[in-house]
Image (cartoon, grey):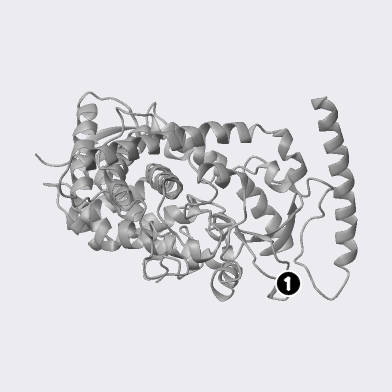
């Protein structure tokens, strides 16, 4: 019986797809000019063309069809944006039309029906949550208040690596970086290290994969009940683990608060959120009095933990990889650190604004290795014409940031090279104002946690480069270092990075 039903669904879906496909061909024969793109197949559209590294496949297709390209992902018309000029049109000029998010299966499970921030549709709820998060959790003052946490963990990191250097050991840098970022962010978000309580990192890694994978159920809805990729099962398992973890912490905090006569002045993000449980997010808004419930906390926390744990460690990992591949750049950065900091002490956060070459290195790393290569997809809320191309309502917008970083008209013929000096006196920033470089997105849906991530990224890279000399193991030459990518919502290295440290500070 189940196999009969499956066959019926496939046949019905095939028929509907052919009808839809041919109807599309006829309805487009009017004066509304759609963007160019490859011809889609029935049912799957262009899904077969994405490959294992979709950002690279889409980059190659855009070189043929142009920076505003139409592909079909199943039944979903998808606009792929691959140049800074096109990105500015979609994320600035027409930002309000493209500020929404598509409904996808992963957000239904992982963020409690898109009750977080990153995957939520544009509207009053999203605006309220964003303002609330920035006010209570992600303001510049809040980020600065966690400087003592970062400093303590930097001391611990340097001592740990120094001990391994004394033994002449080869260090798994990927593992070490992920660990220190996890501890820093755990203390910032939860007020304590979570190591002893749950293996949170594997859940986050699975979350980032499931949120980024091209899920057939999102693009060919009639196949969703079959769960052909097994993604629904994995989503259920991962979301159950995450939500149980957050519920347990909420219960603990509520029990603690009953035993305290006066409400404590909490600093970590999670305690602040739980202290505001069952209160309005925006008391001044009587029309939309969104109340902070458990589902809201779970949804927001999944977004926040996934972004802070995974993307920051991925960015550090790629930056260190490029420095190991380019000894000239490593030496230049160490020289700047010696000049500004000296060799008698570690780097302090107060040193970071003076480290201009470090900023160039970080920008160049994020240009070549954006942690979210396709950003999170946008969705059009109305029919619109952009640069002469008709974009239908409910189209999905994919901005290929990986492709933007390889645009030879912007970065010249050496766009594939790691060359930080290209940013010397260039004026290009990475905060969403210059569309040549938007690793954190831009416009209304730009990443609100950018400052928190950038501060940690700069500090960890500066500390490891300043305190240690590094060499590749097993006589590996710099140009032989494996730089293979692993695709997901973020873009980590496919294989861990290993290197041998030697302590270089005096004393």
Does residue 83 appear anywhere in the picture?
yes
Q: Secondary structure at mark 1?
A: strand
Q: Is residue 302 left or right of residue 277?
A: right
Mark 1 lies on residue: 389
Q: Compared to 253, does 371 lie above or below?
A: below
- The one nearer the camera, 462 or 507, is 462
**Up-down: is 409 above or below 179?**
below
Q: Quadrant of the C terminus?
A: top left
Q: In the rendered image of this protein, does residue 451 appear above or below residue 310?
A: below
User: Quadrant location of the N terminus?
Assistant: top right
Q: At which x and y percent is residue 242?
A: 44, 36
Q: Position of residue 163 (x, y in %)?
A: 20, 28
Q: Give the crowd class for mark 1: few <14, some 14-19, many >=20 residues within 10 Å.
A: some
Q: Is residue 482 visible?
A: no
* Residue depicted at x 47% and y 62%: 446
Q: How far across and down, in percent of the image, does residue 393 sit?
A: 70, 66
The number of callouts visible is: 1
């Amino acid at each position: 019986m189940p196999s009969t039903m499956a066959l019926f669904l496939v046949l019905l879906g095939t028929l509907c797809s052919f009808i839809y496909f041919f109807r599309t061909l006829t309805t487009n024969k009017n004066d509304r000019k759609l963007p160019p793109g490859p011809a889609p197949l029935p049912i799957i559209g262009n899904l077969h063309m994405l490959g294992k590294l979709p950002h690279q496949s889409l980059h190659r297709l855009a070189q043929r069809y142009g920076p505003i390209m139409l592909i079909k992902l199943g039944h979903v018309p998808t606009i792929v944006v691959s140049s800074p000029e096109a990105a500015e049109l979609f994320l600035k000029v027409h930002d309000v039309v493209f500020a929404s998010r598509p409904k996808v299966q992963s957000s239904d499970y992982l963020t409690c029906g898109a009750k977080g921030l990153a995957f939520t549709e544009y509207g009053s709820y999203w605006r309220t949550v964003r303002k609330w998060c920035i006010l209570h959790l992600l303001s510049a003052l809040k980020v600065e208040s966690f400087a003592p946490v970062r400093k303590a963990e930097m001391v611990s990191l340097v001592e740990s690596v120094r001990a391994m250097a004394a033994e002449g050991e080869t260090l798994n840098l990927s593992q070490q970086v992920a660990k220190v970022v996890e501890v820093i962010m755990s203390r910032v978000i939860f007020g304590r290290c979570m190591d002893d309580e749950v293996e949170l990192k594997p859940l986050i890694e699975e979350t980032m994969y499931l949120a980024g994978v091209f899920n057939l159920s999102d693009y060919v809805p009639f196949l969703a009940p079959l769960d052909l990729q097994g993604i629904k099962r994995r989503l259920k398992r991962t979301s159950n683990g995450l939500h149980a973890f957050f519920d347990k912490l909420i219960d603990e905090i509520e029990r603690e608060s009953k035993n305290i006569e006066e409400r404590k002045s909490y600093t970590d993000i999670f305690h602040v959120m739980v202290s505001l449980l069952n209160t309005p997010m925006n008391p001044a808004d009587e029309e939309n009095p969104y109340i902070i419930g458990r589902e809201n906390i779970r949804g927001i926390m999944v977004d926040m933990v996934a972004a802070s744990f995974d993307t920051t460690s991925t960015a550090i990992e790629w930056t260190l990889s490029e420095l190991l591949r380019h000894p000239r750049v490593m030496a230049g950065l160490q020289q700047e650190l010696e000049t500004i900091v000296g060799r008698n002490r570690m780097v302090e956060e107060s040193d970071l604004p003076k480290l201009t070459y470090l900023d160039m290195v970080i920008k160049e790393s994020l240009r070549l290795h954006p942690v979210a290569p396709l950003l999170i997809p946008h969705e059009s809320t109305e029919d619109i014409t952009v640069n002469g191309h008709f974009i239908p309502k409910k189209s999905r917008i994919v901005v290929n940031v990986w492709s933007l970083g390889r645009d030879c008209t912007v970065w010249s013929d050496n766009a594939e090279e790691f060359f930080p000096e290209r940013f010397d006196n260039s004026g290009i920033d990475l905060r969403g104002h210059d569309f040549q470089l938007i690793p954190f997105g831009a416009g209304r849906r730009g990443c609100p946690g950018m400052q928190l991530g950038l501060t940690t990224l700069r500090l960890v890279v500066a500390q490891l480069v300043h305190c240690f000399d590094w060499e590749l193991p097993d006589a590996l030459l710099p140009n032989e270092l494996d730089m293979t990518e692993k695709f997901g919502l973020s873009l980590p290295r496919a294989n861990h990075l290993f290197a041998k440290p030697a302590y270089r500070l005096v004393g």
